[in-house]
Image (spheres, coloured by chain):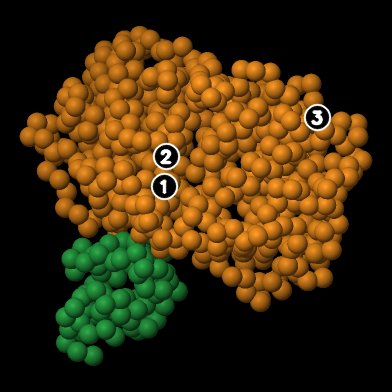
Chain colours: A orange, B green
Amino acid sequence: MTATPVWFGSTKRPLLGWFHTPDAGHARAGVVICPPLGREYLRSQYALRLLAEGLASRGLCAFRFDYDGTGDSSGDERDPGRVAAWIESVTSALALVRRSAVPAVAAVGMRLGATFAAMAARQQGDLDALVLWDPVFSGRAYLAEQRAMSALSFGVPSTQEDGSVEAPGTLFDAATVRDLQALTFPCPSEPLARQMLVLTRSDPSPSQLFSRPDLVNARWEDAPGQAALLDVASPWQVLPHQTIQKIADWLSQASSAAPRPVQIPDRAGAAIVSGNGSHPAVVETPMFVGPVGLFGILSEVSERVTGPTVLFVSVANQHRIGPNRLWVDLARRWAGAGVRSFRFDLSGVGDSPVRWPGQPPFVSWAPEAFDDVMDAARALVPSDPSDVVLIGHSASGYQVLDSALQLVPRGVVSINPVMCFRPPELAAGRPLDRRRRSVLAHPEMVAAFQGRPQPSAPPTRRSELVWRGQMLLSPRRRSSSWLGRLVESGVDVLLVCGGHDGRPIRLGTTARRVRNLSRTGLCRFEHLDELEHGLMISSQRLHVAQMVTDHVLGRFGPDRSEECRVSPSDRRVVPRGPEVPACISEVAQRSSSGQALTTGSGGIGVTT
Amino acid sequence: MTTDENDLTQCIREVLFSFGQLSVELDALGDTDNLFNAGMTSHANVTVMLGLESRLGIQFPDHMLQRRTFESIASIRGALGELLPQIEPV
């Protein structure tokens, strides 16, 4: 089987997709796979990759893609005409698969992707098979569910004054809200496809509250495993292998045509994804790098730029787009400002292969991530792999800190790092990887601080005591130790942490130590008390994006990179800088939703 | 408690039984017991809220979409009391 990334759709707004083809290059049918949106999109990406691979192994060609303004495709959630653009993306994907000369065309859609697939099927009217996987039958009900999820899970006002609705991981503007409310599942008197399979959840879920539409020629079955895939936070999801196999088998049986050679479009080269007359064109190039072929996307402008390359590391077991697409937004914004970046999938997640045959895929905090980061740095900057800035969030927020101790990069930005977890090698009965220098892996600490009901729950007195006791037993793993080592090595460090996520760092050092490190100009700790761990709240995401942008462009942008640069031979010499960077805001920031984000720069509320 | 309140409490319990995914027996749960401590997740909370909206033909306004509205049967009944004119606020 081969997997080939391709750009498709309009050259002005290219969309990124993946062709999965059988080894022989012949296929009995082509299947377009339509993903969900928002947080469901992030959580289902790997499952849909497995489905595509399962189809290819059965002699079918599969095509995965990102809708306009989502994933790696061009555009963003603030663009006008979202619903029409999403449906048009499905139409373009179907047209591309038809052009590949497959003898039959089918589609699979999950959640809103099923709705869009059904609408495209109704428009085109000649689908051979259609699978609706946990479909959304009412746009109004979907919005109500998303609005409630944001309000009840994250405590944000679900409907903004301008009519936009905060959904987990995305913001629907007022026009999109109106279009989604008007979205109804097509139920024509004619079948949507010659064969149709509808898989619905049997566990208690909102979809059970609404009656099933009358779909002609549809076969209804259960979709086991959907709750464990979509309702569970990364990295604790369980892949729905049974449902994936059921869909792949059904589509294989539904495709009885003789195989034909498939004409796959050329592998994606560079494409212009943003820019206009007043802004430089941002070019993105899908690439496989390093000895194992890690997949990532390079973002840059055509002019030669100086300064380090930014490496955005995929988060937990999710793919390279970052927390709710933050890496894509930042990569394009920074490319326009002259900073080159590469967002990539660690091995075994997203679209990267595993490093060795027995490596478990879809795993967070894998020890192989150390090699992955090194491979990416060597591939992107062969002359000096340390001339990079590492950026991570959550599990990869931890990874970039520990990899920075190994690589000694120009800078590191860590957002809500998870410093306390059970490394997979320990869980598998192997010793702790020696490259892990900052992880707090004591089972008591992991149990106390990962099993929390809410990430933002206030610390209890007992848990503070557990922390402090463990810190005393692990002096080299205290943040004061590894932060000191990073700064002494000349690495520029920015830590952005919410109240809960910042505790391992706050409690592992002292206010005086942090002040001293801040005085070097290389260490900055932004403690935003209300910051939600997953950056699911759009206003918080925008706030963090601006903060990180100011920092990275201020330190490493084309205008600053040379004056801030410390040559590799001088990295052990601590350069002196301003005590407090100018871009640090000391005042409390108020988000657009009215939620206060208490900002404290450098000064951490730590008792000695 | 009035008859209407009894009916409302019964309705809440039925919705919780169907969608609450509680880890304890519903019969063992008092009206003021914390539902989140009894195993109700955020996702189950959403389904319970939508279940109540569907069953009673109401819509929870934004200011009621908070965890404390749904933390117990009594707090849910209090919120519904504000939304349903025939029920006296609890």
Is residue A405 placed above or below A251 in the rendered structure?
Answer: below
Of circles 1 and 3, the one toward us is 3
Label ID, residue A40:
none
Is residue A97 placed above or below A37 in the rendered structure?
Answer: above
Q: Outermost residue, front direction? A: A278
Label ID, residue A78:
2
- The reply to whether the C-beta atoms of the residues labelled 2 and 1 are less than 8 Å apart is yes
Identify residue type, mark 2. Answer: Arg
Identify residue type, mark 1. Answer: Leu
Real-space Cα separation, disc 1 to disc 3, in angstroms: 38 Å
The residue shown at (42%, 17%) is: A11
Q: Position of residue A574 (x, y in %)?
A: 89, 43
Of pointers 1 and 3, the one earlier in the residue sequence: 1
Report whether residue B74 is seen.
yes
Chain of the residue where label 1 is placed in the rendered structure: A
Element under disc 2: loop
Chain of the residue where label 2 is placed in the rendered structure: A
- Mark 1 highlights which residue? A171
Is residue A307 placed above or below A527 in the rendered structure?
Answer: above
Of pointers 2 and 1, the one earlier in the residue sequence: 2
Real-space Cα separation, disc 3 to disc 2, in angstroms: 35 Å
Report whether residue A250 is seen.
no
* Mark 2 residue crowding within 10 angstroms, few (<14) / some (14–19) / many (20+): few
Chain of the residue where label 3 is placed in the rendered structure: A
**Which of the 4 quarters of the picture holds residue A44?**
top left
> Which of the pair B59/A372 is nearer the observer?
B59
Identify residue type, mark 3. Answer: Glu
Q: Position of residue A106 (x, y in %)?
A: 26, 25
Tell me the quadrant of the picture where the C terminus of chain A can be found: bottom right
- Mark 3 highlights which residue? A562
